[in-house]
Image (cartoon, rainbow, N blue to C red):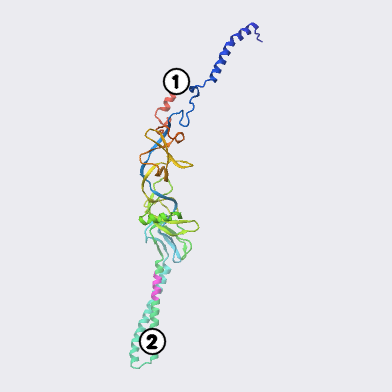
Amino acid sequence: MIFVSSSSLHRSIHWLAPVAALALMASTSGCGDKSPAAGGGGRGGRGGAGGPAPVLVGTVHRKVVPILIDAIGAVEPIHSAMIRSQITGSLMKIDIKEGQDVNQGDLLFEIDPRPLQNTLASAEADREKIRVQLENARNQVVRYRNLSNESMVSKEQFQQIQDNERALSAQALSNDSAVANAKLQLEYCSIRAPIAGRTGNLSVHEGDLVRANDIGAMVTINQLSPIYVTFGVPQQYLAILARYHSDTMLTVNVVPPGIDATPEKGELTFMDNTVDASTGTLKLKATFENTQHRLWPAQFTTVAVTLAAPEVLVIASSAVQTSQTGQHVFVVKPDNTAELRPVTIERTLDADAVVTKGLAEAEVVVTDGQLRVIPGKPVEVKQADAPATDPKSEPGRGKGKGKAKKQES
């Protein structure tokens, strides 16, 4: 236990009293200081400390801004063929591979032709038999006509010979048809591509028994170039589409999904003659060459129809402000003061706003910092901030920082 004498305690209190008084005076003077320096800013309004408001600006200029109608479309082939067998038989050979490009007339499948070859031979034999009988009947008609003229045979007997000749003539025509049909059936043993395009999935194999006009297709061929993109637009665009489409062929751009955002360019080639009553949309089709096969059947794409490409006055869309009285912008006058100007914006495209009223070419408008701008007050034009640089990406930065830490330690 530590003991403190009363004299020592009295001397300590006597020494601490002036120090406490000084501390109280400093605290009182700090609380009562009302100078601008102590406040760090004062009352400056939206401009900040009463100075010019810092802003970014842009210029009103002319630019070609197309008039577009956007939609979602689906790719579909102009020609598509589902290949089925027209005869029943065994599939002997498949002459294509899945996903192969074929030309019109290329051999696809071969069916066993032997049964049909026998049918053709039988039909040709029957035709030859009837031809012989017909030739003999015609000779009899000539011979009996002379005898009938000389009244050596009855008219009834001559009429019967003529009827026999006519019946054999009709039977000869029937046999000719049977031979032609047998030849056609034999041709069906070789199944060829009716259109040029790309083959899909094969649903048959060599040795399978295929039947005439079976429900399932042996393979489907889709034409890829050229190709359609089908899409619908609301019916309120019908009048403007009809007006622009009557003057010129409208350009259509589509962007297929993927990493390549380059659009494919085509032309509007079809407008349906009726509006879909269930959806209130008008069906349209655009044709694309699709030489690089970027468009694929049943694929969904974004579609943009270009109605016109006029040159108009534009400003950055970020410059346009909306209030209860309408749209307006802040115009920077030559004396660097701001003027609130009502404007009429016709449309926007990407980062551009098309101005039809309220601005003139080459005028300067505020594009950023409008919250601090007061009409009639000065503004200070700032430069856009440069993108921040990653210190690790600069050569030698990481190494230098390491040295500094080592020195500090």
Q: Which amino acid does label 1 sit on?
A: Gln
**Neighbour class for label 1 at 10 Å: few (<14), some, many (≥20)?**
few
In the image, residue 359 above or below residue 48: below
Q: Can residue 126 be seen in this view?
A: no
What is the x, y in percent for residue 184?
A: 40, 69
Quarter the N terminus occupies: top right
**Neighbour class for label 2 at 10 Å: few (<14), some, many (≥20)?**
some
Q: Indicate whether residue 179 is drawn in magenta.
A: yes
Name the secondary structure under disc 1: helix
What is the x, y in percent for residue 259?
A: 42, 45
Q: In which quarter of the image is residue 63?
A: top left
Query: Residue drawn at (36%, 79%), measured in percent from left and top?
Result: 131
Q: Which of marks 1 and 2 is nearer the N terminus?
A: 2
Q: In which quarter of the image is residue 402?
A: top left
Q: Please state which of the two labelled residues, at mark 1 or mark 2, is closer to the viewer.
A: 1
The answer to which of 194 and 301 lies nearer the viewer is: 301
What is the x, y in percent for residue 317?
A: 42, 41
What is the x, y in percent for residue 257?
A: 43, 48
Q: Which amino acid does label 2 sit on?
A: Ile
Describe residue 15's horizontal placement relative to residue 199 as left or right: right
Mark 2 lies on residue: 161
Q: Can residue 219 be seen in this view?
A: yes
Mark 1 lies on residue: 407
Query: Residue drawn at (38%, 75%), measured in percent from left and top?
Result: 176
The answer to which of 345 and 63 lies nearer the viewer is: 345
Magenta stretch: helix, strand or loop mostly: helix
Query: Residue drawn at (57%, 16%), measured in percent from left and top?
Result: 24
Q: Indicate whether residue 240 is drawn in magenta.
A: no
Boundaries of the magenta span: 175-183
Q: Label 1 vs label 2: CA separation?
A: 132 Å
